[in-house]
Image (spheres, rainbow, N blue to C red):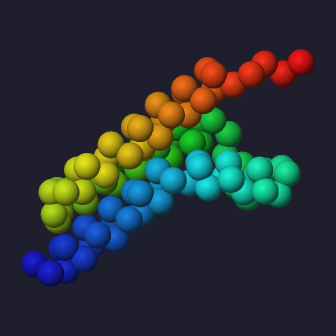
Amino acid sequence: MKWRTAIANVIGCIGIACSFAFWIEACVSKVVGHTPVWLDMGLDGWVWGWALGIVLALTAAVLGPRRWAFAALLPIVSFLVFIVLVGLSPPDW
């Protein structure tokens, strides 16, 4: 039973990493001044990353502690914050 919890924790942490990957890429591109090629996935890639984060968090909740179900909210909130920031960004002149 302990191995199931350990596997669930690993899967859940990978799901959280998928959720934060977009924001890590955004911070790196601000610091470096451009997006490194190995981080550039395009918007479609990031949407799939957020979807993978939801699936992995729910898988972790099924395998182990049910608190991982709350981690499924993280990619959803991340996506909504992205939509709000894109909608509120000033126009390029």
23 left or right, relative to 81: right
Please determine whether, in this image, residue 86 is positioned above or below residue 5.
above
The answer to whether one can see residue 43 in this image is: yes
Please determine whether, in this image, residue 71 is positioned above or below residue 2.
above
Please determine whether, in this image, residue 83 is positioned above or below residue 72.
above
Q: Which residue occupies the extreme bottom position in the image?
A: 2
- Toward which corner of the image does residue 9 lie, by quadrant? bottom left
Residue 61, given in percent of the width and then of the height, sits at 20, 56
Taking the spot 68% from the left edge, 53% from the top edge, the residue there is: 27
**Front residue of 70 and 15:** 70
The answer to whether one can see residue 37 in this image is: no
Taking the spot 23% from the left edge, 50% from the top edge, the residue there is: 69
Q: Which residue occupies the extreme left position in the image?
A: 1
Quadrant of the image containing the C terminus: top right
Please determine whether, in this image, residue 68 is positioned above or below residue 42.
below
Residue 83, given in percent of the width and then of the height, sits at 55, 27
**Front residue of 81 and 64:** 81
24 left or right, relative to 65: right
Quadrant of the image containing the N terminus: bottom left
Residue 57, given in percent of the width and then of the height, sits at 31, 53
- Toward which corner of the image does residue 66 lie, by quadrant? bottom left
63 left or right, relative to 22: left
Taking the spot 74% from the left edge, 22% from the top edge, the residue there is: 90
Taking the spot 18% from the left edge, 74% from the top edge, the residue there is: 4
User: Exactly how many numbered labels are in the figure?
Assistant: 0
Q: Which residue occupies the extreme right position in the image?
A: 93
